[in-house]
Image (cartoon, rainbow, N blue to C red):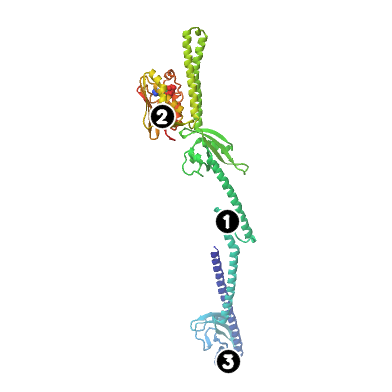
Amino acid sequence: MQKSFFAVCTVIILLTAVLITYNMLRNGQKIYFNQSISLLGDEAYLLEEIMDATSFDLENTKISIEKYGKKLDVKIAILDTDGVVVLQTNNIHTLVGEQNPEVETALKGNTGNDIRFSKVDNTTYIYIAVPIEMQNKKCVLWLSKSVDTNNLFHEKIMMDGLKIVGIVTVIALIIVNFIIKTMIEPINKMTKTVNEIAQGNYHKKVHIGESGRFGTLAHAINNMSQVLESTIEDLKDRNTKLEAMANGMKDAVIAIDYEYKIILINPMCYKLFSLDGDVMNKNIFDVLRNEHIFNAIEYVLKRQDAIEKEFKYVRNKTIKLHANPILSRDDGGACIGALLLMEDVTKIRKLEIMRRSFVSNVTHELKTPLTSIRGFIETLKNGAISNPTIANKFLDIIDIEAERLYNLIQDILALSEIEVREQDFDVSYYNIEEITDHVFNILKPKADSKNIDLQFHVEVGVVDFLCNKSRMYQMLINLIDNAINYTEEGTVKLLCKKENNYLIFVIEDTGIGIEASQIPRIFERFYRVDKGRSRRTGGTGLGLSIVKHIVMLYKGEISMKSVVNEGTTCTVRLPYINN
Ligand code: ADP
């Protein structure tokens, strides 16, 4: 920039110098010519007076003009009023006559002059023609003199001119250089620094002297960059904290400006709405097409007020939305955007529903035996107690109902105890054969009473399993007890094996079986395929639910396969996690 400025200035200065020199030369030449013409004019009038005063004949006049011509170094001719040469000096080699402009003027009664270049001797001549009267006879006196265009006078003018132009050029270039140094250089430095600051290089400073206007401006730029740097640092710091906070939140967070552009979004939001790619600065309605979100944002931006709502999202998700306006600190607290906090409350809502139905189921389950107990006590009080046979029968029923109540309460307690656990307590390595033996001894009498062949088999290679012994009993007793309860005749088999680091229990019966459509529901609390049969066998409807939670506690899997009237096979797979 500086170089080009210098080059432009140099060209302008040199052009100006050339123009001035040319002009000076032209004017100098003009002055010289004018002076020469004036001098020749004076000589012409002098000659006129001499010749007019003296009476010459033609011969003498010729001698006279030859003499004066030589003395004055001029060419002289005398023409008549028709423009025809009467006399002329010998040094005239061209034709003189009225075709010459100066002669034409003189013939009209005025003094004429002209400057012409003669090709004959390659010289420039000045010409003058004066109307004169010689011995009362009108005629024209014509004089011509060569002018030296390359004379010393010219050279001097040119040299002087060139000297002046040279000095002026040097002075001008020094001034230009000074301007570049004192004005353009600081401006360039400041422009460069401001550009770097604009690109984020806030610690950049302008290094020019402190004095003058540029010094003040540089000082102001340096101050500005310092303030900008600290403001940006402050903003970055706040942004980092804000991002860390948003990223650490369990809820989805999304903030938009007043043009609906996303200005903040956390990973949880990406997860909740299964978003892909960078959505920053995109319009929220292009990213989340949901009328509830749209309505909430419109409400918040228009009313500048918070709103809370719950809605269903894809795949039956329940989302709780809190939308708040973002108010500006300046502008009298104008609304500049909205902040949305979204919570996935699907599990909570499902749990609430489950809890409500559990409470109503428990109430119902407790009510049935209690009503029965109260009914028989009432009947006993009303006189049946005096009949020992009937009284004993009623007391037996009350006993059965009381036991059912006890079992129900035990199962409810067991279920709620397992549900809250993440890991089982009081665990140790137990021999699986010892556990199954214990279960066999408990259930053998019941199987025998129903003439059911109870078979237990533990394969070789089943190693000790890290567990809570009572929990294993609870799980196996529930499953095998069910198999006995729902089998009229035949066998109930337990097979235990180790496969791919899994402890596997297979319980197989030849019982009534379960319809395929019922199988997904039998693990639900209080769900029974046949209520009457379950009650007769003393079932609470919680057995399989307890088993499922025990299996989950051990990070295992349970599956049921069944064919109605042929039998049921239940498979439990528990991983040897720490074994
Ligand atoms: P219950 O106390 O009624 O046995 P469970 O939760 O143990 O409750 O079982 C739920 C239901 O699953 C039972 O009511 C029964 O209808 C069915 N069921 C469980 N095991 C068997 C099985 N081995 N054969 C046939 N039906 C079964």
Q: Quadrant of residue 139?
A: bottom right
Query: Which of the pair 69/160 is nearer the observer?
Result: 160
Residue 104, percent across and down? 54, 80
**CA separation, marks 1 and 2?**
76 Å
Q: Are marks 1 and 3 in contact (CB under 8 Å)?
A: no
Q: CA distance from mark 2 to mark 3?
A: 171 Å
The quarter of the picture where the N terminus appears is bottom right
Q: Nearer the viewer, residue 352 or 471?
A: 471
Earlier sequence position, callout 2 versus callout 3: 3
**Depth check, front residue: 144 or 32:** 32
Kindly indicate the quadrant of the structure image that contains residue 212. Answer: bottom right
* Secondary element type, mark 2: helix
Dot 1 amino acid type: Lys
Q: Is mark 1 within 8 Å of ligand 1?
A: no
The residue indicated by pointer 2 is: 432
Q: Which residue is mark 1?
A: 204
Instruction: Classify residue 458 as left or right of residue 139.
Output: left
Q: Quadrant of ligand 1?
A: top left
Residue located at (54% from left, 33% from top): 309
| 40 shown above or below 256 | below
At 52% across and 80% down in the image, what residue appears? 116
Q: Are marks 2 and 3 in contact (CB under 8 Å)?
A: no
Task: Name the front one of labels 2 and 3.
Answer: 2
Badge 2: few (under 14), some or many (20 or more) residues near its Cα, within 10 Å? many
The residue singled out by tag 3 in the image is 56
